[in-house]
């Protein structure tokens, strides 16, 4: 498995190596550490081109030093580690490197951009989640990294969500005996419907959604068995919740001390996406737990 790890040299990366080794099977992984710097005309107007040139030279030195130090920490944990340094918008650089290197996974922490770039570029995590050619593992700054004992997998009945569950089982098969997969479906009725529709209609709709949720979770259980995992028969392995999907998944992760939340990127229908937004993006930007987004 080839893993691309964009590094933000302005964030603290002291725990990143241990965090990665606790939530990813790194033993046979090929790691590519990357950093990007983008020239900003806005800064040049304020500080003058000469001062900006000196600033970017110092940024390059710091970035290369940080990547080399981090590579030394990861080399004992992975099959191989290399560094990659490029100029350009961070999100575009990450996407480009992932495509060229045929990355199987991108691990991104926080904004994955430096202090200077973030002023002008907005949130790189959101852009990467939207446009990445491969799955993304998001570790927000200060994320709660628990032992990978319980993993929440969000299912919404879509084919993308089913494939996300399959891919997770394939990726983590070596760790299957120590992981309890918790399948979750969140029943969500948009707020305006509750005010407009008759109470009888809402009650019937909730009953139908609840039955559909149980069928979706049962199908997820079958997928786990087909992937060669031992089925967990505990009642808390199949959960139906009601409310905002991203909020409920994150809340459940806190309640059970989950090590990871797994979702598919925009696994809903177009109508649901319009009404509810992207669950994967909301989790990637706001969750205090590691989030693995399959595409």
Image (spheres, rainbow, N blue to C red):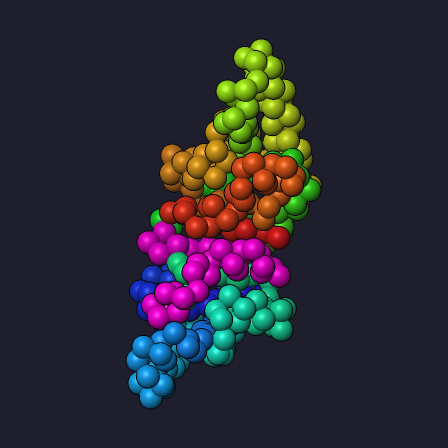
- View extreme (front): residue: 45
Residue 46 locus on image (x, y percent): 32, 77
Residue shown at 53% from the left, 42% from the top: 277
Q: Is 202 or 230 nearer to us in this picture?
A: 202
- View extreme (bottom): residue: 50
Numbered label tally: 0
Q: Determine which quarter of the picture holds residue 212.
A: top right
Q: Is residue 99 visible?
A: yes
Residue 92 locus on image (x, y percent): 54, 68
Residue shown at 54% from the left, 44% from the top: 278
Q: Which residues are magenta?
A: 114-143
Q: Reply yes or no: does residue 116 show up in magenta.
A: yes
Q: Is 286 or 69 nearer to us in this picture?
A: 286
Residue shown at 40% from the left, 36% from the top: 251
- View extreme (top): residue: 200
Q: Reply yes or no: does residue 87 show up in magenta.
A: no
Is residue 217 rendered to the left or right of residue 10?
right
From the viewer's perspective, is residue 5 above or below residue 54? above
Q: Is residue 20 visible?
A: no
From the viewer's perspective, is residue 292 above or below residue 180? below
Q: Is 162 or 246 nearer to us in this picture?
A: 246
Residue 142 locus on image (x, y percent): 33, 54
Residue 8 locus on image (x, y percent): 39, 68
Q: Quadrant of the N terminus?
A: bottom right
Is residue 118 rendered to the left or right of residue 262?
left
Residue shown at 65% from the left, 39% from the top: 269
């Amino acid at each position: 498995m080839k893993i691309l790890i964009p590094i933000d040299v302005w964030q603290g990366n002291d725990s990143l190596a241990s965090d990665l080794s606790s939530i990813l099977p790194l033993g046979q992984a090929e790691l590519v550490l990357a950093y990007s710097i983008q020239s900003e005309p806005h800064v040049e107007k304020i500080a003058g081109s000469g001062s900006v040139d000196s600033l970017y030279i110092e940024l390059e030195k710091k970035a290369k030093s940080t990547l080399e130090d981090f590579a030394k920490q990861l080399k004992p944990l992975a099959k191989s580690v290399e560094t990659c340094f490029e100029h350009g918008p961070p999100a575009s650089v990450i996407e480009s490197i992932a495509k060229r290197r045929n990355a199987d996974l991108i691990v991104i922490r926080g904004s994955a951009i430096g202090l200077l770039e973030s002023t002008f570029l907005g949130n790189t995590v959101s852009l990467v989640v939207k446009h990445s050619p491969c799955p993304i593992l998001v570790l927000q700054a200060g994320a709660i990294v628990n032992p990978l004992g319980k993993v929440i997998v969000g299912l919404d009945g879509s084919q993308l969500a089913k494939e996300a569950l399959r891919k997770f089982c394939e990726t983590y098969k070596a760790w299957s005996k120590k992981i309890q997969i918790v399948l979750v479906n969140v029943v969500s009725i948009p707020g305006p419907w509750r005010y407009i529709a008759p109470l009888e209609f809402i009650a019937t709709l909730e009953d139908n959604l609840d039955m559909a949720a149980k069928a979706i979770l049962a199908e997820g259980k079958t997928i786990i068995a087909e992937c060669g995992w031992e089925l967990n028969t505990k009642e808390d392995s199949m959960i139906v919740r009601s409310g905002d999907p991203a909020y409920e998944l994150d809340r459940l992760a806190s309640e059970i001390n989950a090590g990871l939340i797994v979702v598919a990127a925009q696994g809903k229908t177009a109508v649901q996406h319009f009404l509810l937004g992207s669950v994967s993006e909301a989790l990637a930007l706001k969750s205090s737990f590691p989030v693995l987004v399959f595409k």
